[in-house]
Amino acid sequence: MLKRKLGATLIQIARFPMVFPLVKFFFKHMGQHLLIDRISENSHWMAFHHPRPAYPLHILILPKDGITSLLEAPTDQPEIYTDLIEIVKTLVKNNQLDEKGYRLITNGGRNQSLPQWHWHLIGELDGDTHA
């Protein structure tokens, strides 16, 4: 629970433009020290439960390289996207989301509240129904 609160605090701090370069450096060079409970991780991505979930199952997937937005995503490193698909597939399988249904969302522009490119994997938990 403490890690989740600290993770939420880090996300709140990262929203300030003057602080984000420090947060970006931290993600890129010291991400292994993030105070979060990782539920999945590979060479380029880390996934953890959203500290302030808006859905019954709400997982954040962030690049370890501190990519600011989709528009800043490199086009010369296909392994980043292969790793993204692999981590999403692992999360979908581990949470039985193929049967339950899920959404994979990335936001941009004004809809991107955190200046760090990230994905939301959202779905239902056992016993939940979609209205």
Image (cartoon, grey):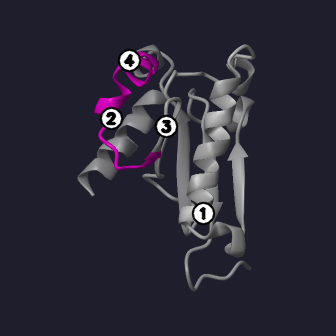
Q: Gap between marks 3 and 1, in whole Å?
A: 16 Å
**Which residue bears the numbered disc 2?**
34
Query: Is residue 70 rendered to the left or right of residue 50?
Result: right
The image quadrant of residue 76 is: top right
Q: What type is the residue that disc 3 sits on?
A: Asn
User: Which residues make up the magenta segment?
Assistant: 24-40
- Check if mark 3's residue and mark 1's residue have beta carbons within 8 Å: no
**Which residue bears the numbered disc 1?**
93
Count neighbours of disc 1 (C-alpha within 10 A) and say few if under 14, some if 14 to 19, many if 20 or more: few
Q: Which mark is residue 29?
A: 4
Q: Position of residue 53 (x, y in %)?
A: 51, 58
Magenta segment includes 72: no
Q: Earlier in the sequence, mark 1 or mark 4?
A: 4
Magenta segment includes 28: yes
Q: SS at mark 4?
A: helix
Q: Gap between marks 4 and 3, in whole Å?
A: 15 Å
Residue located 34% across and 22% down the image: 30
Q: Earlier in the sequence, mark 3 or mark 1?
A: 3
Residue located 53% across and 29% down the image: 44
